[in-house]
Image: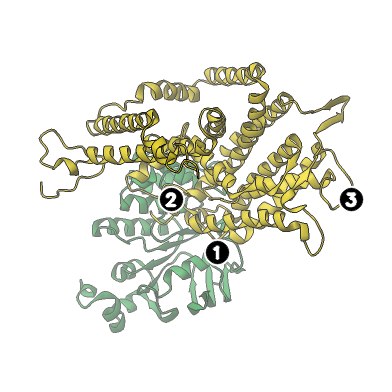
Amino acid sequence: MSNPTLERGETPGPGSRLPWHRNEDYRRMFSLLMVGLVVALMTGPSGNRDHPTDGFTGSWFHPRVLLFLGAAAAIGVLMTLYDRSKGAGRRNPLQPVIAPITAVRDRMTSQPLLRYSVYAAILVFAVLYPMTLTPFWQRVLVDQIGVYVLLALGLNIVVGLAGLLDLGYIAFFAIGAYTTAYFTGKLPVAPPFTLNPFEVVPIAILATLVAGVLLGGPTLRLRGDYLAIVTLGFGEIVRILAVNGDAFFGTNVTNGPRGAVGIPHPSIHAFGINYDWTLKSLPYYYLLLVLVVGLLIAFNRLENSRVGRAWTAIREDEVAAAASGVPTVKYKLMAFAIGASTSGFAGVLYASKVGFISPDNFLLLFSLLVVTMVIFGGMGSLPGVVLGAAVLQWMPQVLRGKVPPEDRYIYFGALLILMMIFRPQGLLPSRRRSRELKLSEEGLGGADSLGATPGTTS
Amino acid sequence: MAMLELQDVHVKYGAVEALKGVTLEVNEGEIVTLLGANGAGKTTTLRTISGLLRPSAGRILFEGRPIDQMPAHEVLGIGVGHVPEGRRVFPRMSVQENLEMGAYQRKGGNKEVMQRVFELFPVLSERKSQEGGTLSGGEQQMLAIGRALMSRPRLILLDEPSMGLAPLIVAKIFEIIAEINDDGTTVLLVEQNAAQALKLAGRGYVLETGSIVMSDDAATLLSDDRVRAAYLGEDIGAA
């Protein structure tokens, strides 16, 4: 063997002449065990003035250490098996789980009957299941999951379809929420007329649409990383405006870090219907369900229309798209505007459901969280992003009470890392996207808006 | 009246002037080639014509209409097709989808044009469902040309179609360019491969650091000493 370093993923046979410490598998196992130790230490108790050694003794000499080391070893073995199975052309160990799902999905495209029965089954489940949940989980379903499903669906248009990486997406959510607070009279500046949160919806959509175009306009020439940085800045500007808006040229506009309190619940008094949403979560859930189903249908149609094709072309190669006659400016702005207004819409619902908003609801972290949901679920795939948002919002709630609160993000991170190793294309990737990823692994073309700038490779 | 006219066109990238007053014309039915070294401004010229760049001064007329302020998709709409440098096929769309993107602006059927593209490039019809990114360099070039033809342009701008291709493939692509021209499409061809471009073209322009320094019949240019020295090497011109 002339080259002693092993290619990643290549596993030496039993007769390999490599010293054991250079063997990829052993090296990985060592790193994993180290990570296991670090995690064990980090999740342990921290010391205090009376018991300064607690952080140490409580972490090293505790069954939890064995648990984490065991988990690390198990992951190591799994990864080795996974690599071997790939190397030997054998089946992916996860194949028995994935294959049936893939088979059903494949069949769904060709058999409309099956497709609609699957949709119907999911819908029935989505209608009935939440009724059996405790009020706590119903609230999670609305405040955490439902709102973020809306956000993820909107961002999916921008990132997943048009390939524009937007890291300031939560700003539109904030604009929607603050618009609601303003028009319901809960900001220090009085609105010209007060409205019911439902009546704010068109105004909020318009406001975020304009904000989307305002952000999109000047950034149209940017791509990839550069666009990401500018949008990130935009998100922070909006949040900081909200924080410092209590002394906006001497006027208190946003109430600063204290935010807006007492935003009313929405209600309908029209067409002979009189309904008031209250503190109960379930009615909000059904409202959200109707909206999400509506958006799914609308976005699905959009994706398969001329607009969707234009977005695909822009994502794959913007210059080629322009040369093929796609009005790239128009469609990029459109993606921004649709994504932004969906986010604004979610903002209205969130503000009126929770009744209280402050700049802390719109941290950069949440922008990143929505991007993570889109990637985790499968960029460009509608069922994927819904599932991604649901899983990622559900997980911290499950861990609540089971692990110390400050550790929750460690588990969250571990889930993401595992995902990136074993299923980088996301939970339910769109077909085109998984092909794109496969091709980019083979060195053909940039993967997406999150990696190489599209269009720099042929 | 010339089909395409550039009148004293200037283009700037920030403070750098890439084109310093380019004037040229292409008549209907011609093949005109634009020669020049790397960085002379050939690609910039084509991208300015097709609306991907805006000139800072000067005028561009297509069939008498000013097009210098038109966005790219409108320029394409009035009959100017552009095959960008480096092929730039959509890597993850199939060959068929790539071609369909070329007809993005056309409403209604494009079967006929696609049929013609497949006649010109039989290899593309064999690979209809293959992804653009998995084609060979020559096939990608063919696909890029085919995609531009899908919009039924009356003038096609070709940016270095020979780039990075084997001589045999280059010869084939040049044959097809001649065929496209026979179909009635006017061609403006940017090339570094001066010998072959001048044999194919009727007239040529030589671009040097943003200005046209020579223009003449292709045959005259081919025998011009300066052109031979600068772009053909000493022996190739005679071959």
* Residue at x-position 43% and y-position 40%: A55
Q: Amino acid at mark 3?
A: Pro
Colour representing chain A: yellow
| Sequence-first tag of 3 and 2 | 3
Q: Which residue position is annotated with label 1?
A: B51
Q: CA distance from mark 3 to mark 2?
A: 46 Å
Q: Are marks 2 and 1 in contact (CB under 8 Å)?
A: no
The chain under label 2 reads A
Query: Residue at the spot x=21%, y=74% of the render?
Result: B238
Assign a secondary structure to mark 2: loop
**Closest to the observer, B129 or A310:** A310
User: Could you confirm whether marks 3 and 1 are on the same chain?
Assistant: no
Residue A255 visible at all:
yes
Give the residue at mark 3.
Answer: A192
Left or right of A253? Residue B153 is left
Residue reaching furthest to the front: A50
For marks 2 and 1, give the CA distance.
28 Å
